[in-house]
Every structure is written in structure tokens, then in C-alpha cells.
Image (spheres, rainbow, N blue to C red):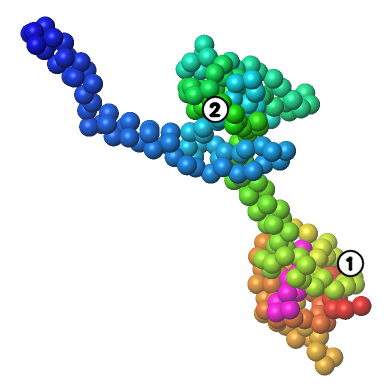
Amino acid sequence: MSLACLFLTSNVALGQDMTANETKGTSLSSQWQHGEGLVTHGPDGKVVFLYGEVQPSVVCSPLQVCDIELQPGEVVRDVLVGDSVRWKVEPATSGAAGAQAVHLIVKPSEPGIETSMVVTTSRRTYHIRLKSHHADYMARVGFEYPDDVAARLDEINQRMEASIIGGAGVPAENLDFGFRTDGAARWKPTRIYTDGLKTYIQFPSALAGSDAPVLFVISGGENRIVNYRLQSNMMVVDYLIDHAVLVSGVGNRQQKITIRRGQ
């Protein structure tokens, strides 16, 4: 072999060498590109990928079209195809104005070819591998988005928290609101309920210590003062009360509210 050939062969070999980081990087990328990932069955025959988990591989076929549907409201910025000669990608839309979904209609010119596609949008970037088969193809493709799942979970949690009654920390359906009140006072309770163990008396606004009424439980015809805790606008009594009175002030300025459980 001539020196020129040896020099050329050596340069080619050197040009193909990679550093440790390059080798590690390509290995990690290959794992993501060729990972199995999660594929599920969606409505109307749609094949659904979990966005971002792996690089989804979409199989198309000549003389057929693959419909890749993006998230409603998502605006496509650019579509870049590695092999733009043998692969055609055309946009389409569906849905009402303001919530339209973009569809990428993908068509290969021949079987047995493969390329990659990058789609940049107003919300994210899609990296998709395109493969062509002589007969089999995915007619409809879509995505499930982890952020959407998290948002739905947050919404559910917020609804559950909204159904929790303050103070008791349990859902409203587990509480007994069967109390009635008599009398007039500027601090007259707006709601009284029990969880079967404690009684919660809710006032229209937070009470300062000097403005808070005193709670007496009526038992055997006598008024007995009881211990309770004030938490902002909530008075928490550590047991179930049947008949009680709230008293504030003295003399002509005294205000009193009577509380009875049951009808």
C-alpha cells in the first residue's frame, strides 16, 4: 500500500474516533432513540405516545397517510425533516377556532426508508423517527403530556381541598350541621358543626381575645363554662355539645346566642 493510501486510511480512522464524552453521549441518545417507551390505545384508533419518554417511532406506508395530531391550541413554528425528498409532511387543522389542533400529514414515497423529524411549537419540541413499511402503518398518532396529567391532578386536589371544611379537616359529607341558633349579636356564628368528637363554631370574622364571647354549656339547668380554643374565626370545643350559650358583654350591652343541637 502506498504512503498516500496509508495516510488517507489513517485520517479516516482518526476522523471516526470519538472522545469518552462523545461515546457516552451517543450511547445515551441511542437509548432514548430506541427505547420501547409507553404506547397506548387512544380514541378512534389513535396510537398514543407519552411525550418526552423516548423518541417515538411512527410507521407509515406509501400511498397511505399518517396523521400526527398535536395538542389543541399548540402553534407549530417549524417542521424539519432529515430526508425531505422522499418524505412529505403537510399541515392540516381540526377543531373550533381558538382551540384548533394541528395535524401533520406524513407520506413516504417508498417502503424501507427511515428518517427523523423535528417539530418546534409554541409549547414544546417534538423529536420523531419516521419509518416506512410496504403495508403496515399508523393511521392516527397522538400524545399524552405529563404536564397535563399533573395539572389534572392539581385540579382534583384543589376540588378535594375545597370540599374540606375549615377546622375539622374532613369532607363536608362526614360532618353534622344539625345545630340551630337563637338571639342576635354582631358576632353571631355563621356555621356550627361537629365531626362526632369535637364541635366547631365558625364566626363571621376573626375574633380578638377581648371580643370573643364566652361559651357556657347548659347541663342540668346550670351554665358551666367550658374550655375551647380560638383559631382565627373558629372556636373549637373538644367534645360534642347539645345545648350551650355564647355570651359577650355585661348589663345592657350583653349579647347572647343560644345553641341547640337537633331540630
Marks 1 & 2, CB-CB < 8 Å contact: no
In this rendering, is residue 129 above or below 189? above
Amino acid type, callout 1? Ala
Among all residues in the image, which is located at the extreme bottom?
220
Q: Disc 1 and disc 2: Cα gap in Å? A: 81 Å
Instruction: Please give left or right for residue 178 compared with residue 225 in the image.
Output: right
Image point 19% across, 19% down: which residue? 13
In this rendering, is residue 155 above or below 245? above
Residue numbers of the magenta segment:
194-203
Per the image, label 2 sits on a secondary structure element best described as loop
Residue 6 horizontal/vertical position (percent): 11, 12
Image point 69% across, 57% down: which residue? 160
Question: Based on the displayed image, in which of its 4 quarters is residue 109 positioned?
Answer: top right
Neighbourhood count class around disc 1 (C-alpha, 10 Å): few under 14, some 14–19, many 20 upward: few
Amino acid type, callout 2? His
181 or 39, which lies in front?
A: 39
Residue 236 horizontal/vertical position (percent): 69, 72
Residue at the spot of label 1: 184
Instruction: Please give left or right for residue 206 compared with residue 184 in the image.
Output: left
8 falls in the magenta region: no
Per the image, label 1 sits on a secondary structure element best described as loop
Image point 20% across, 15% down: which residue? 12
Residue 208 horizontal/vertical position (percent): 68, 62
238 or 122, which lies in front?
A: 122
